[in-house]
């Protein structure tokens, strides 16, 4: 769902696609394109549109134009350079967040969870909170 905004994931998907290992890609518009929740882009290669056609046939008249219109307006207003800048900024902010979260975790006896190959998610242990009897999840 988040792959469009991470260059390493896009490269891996593109490589798998060229090798014929991907039938279609689904990208939620809110997570990838900074628009309100509710839309998705389903795409496939030129020579293999069967999956996209099947999805399209399954939703005749039920899908709203609003998410795609939001996407169109957002991309047109950003332009190519704005889109590229947003991707670069996301990578910079990710690194900053990871560094700061690592420092915060260490200062509190916690650790960052290693997620090799995942340039999107950051996880942190909460063992200290659990040991203190604090709730994990809704209690945080």
Image (cartoon, rainbow, N blue to C red):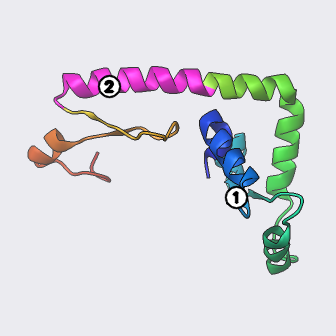
Position above or below: 100 against 8 = above
Tell me, yes or no, whether the highlighted magenta stretch contains residue 126: no
* Residue in the picture at 90% in, 35% down: 76
Q: What element carries label 1?
A: strand
Callout 2 touching callout 1 (CB < 8 Å): no
Q: Which mark identifies residue 90? A: none
Front-most of 48 and 65? Answer: 48
Total labels drawn:
2
User: Mark 2 highlights which residue?
Assistant: 102
Front-most of 129 and 87? Answer: 87
The quarter holding residue 59 reads: bottom right
Position above or below: 74 against 61 = above
Q: What element carries label 2?
A: helix
Q: Which residue lies furthest to the front in this view?
A: 19
Position above or below: 49 against 5 = below
Screen quadrant of the C terminus: top left
* Residue in the picture at 89% in, 58% down: 46
Residue 38 visible in the snapshot: no
Residue 7 visible in the snapshot: yes
Please rate how many residues cluster around mark 2, counting C-alpha atoms within 10 Å: few if below 14, some from 14 to 19, many from 20.
some
User: Mark 1 highlights which residue?
Assistant: 26
Residue interval drawn in magenta = 90-109
Q: Horizontal and vertical percent for residue 14?
A: 72, 46
* Residue in the picture at 52% in, 39% down: 120
The quarter holding residue 49 reads: bottom right
Distance Cα–Cα, label 2 vs label 1: 31 Å
Q: Horizontal and vertical percent for residue 97?
A: 45, 25
Q: Reading the chain from its start, which is encountered first: label 2 or label 1?
A: 1
């Amino acid at each position: 769902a988040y792959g469009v905004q991470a260059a390493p994931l896009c490269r891996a998907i593109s490589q798998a696609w060229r090798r014929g290992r991907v039938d279609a890609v689904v990208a939620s518009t809110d997570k990838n394109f900074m628009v309100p929740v509710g839309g998705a882009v389903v795409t496939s290669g030129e020579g293999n549109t069967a999956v996209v056609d099947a999805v399209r046939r399954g939703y005749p008249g039920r899908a709203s134009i609003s998410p795609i219109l939001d996407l169109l307006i957002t991309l047109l207003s950003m332009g190519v350079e704005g889109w590229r800048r947003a991707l670069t900024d996301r990578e910079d902010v990710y690194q900053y967040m990871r560094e700061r979260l690592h420092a915060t975790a260490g200062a509190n006896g916690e650790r960052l969870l290693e997620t090799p190959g995942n340039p999107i998610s950051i996880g942190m242990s909460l063992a200290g909170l659990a040991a203190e009897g604090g709730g994990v999840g809704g209690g945080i």
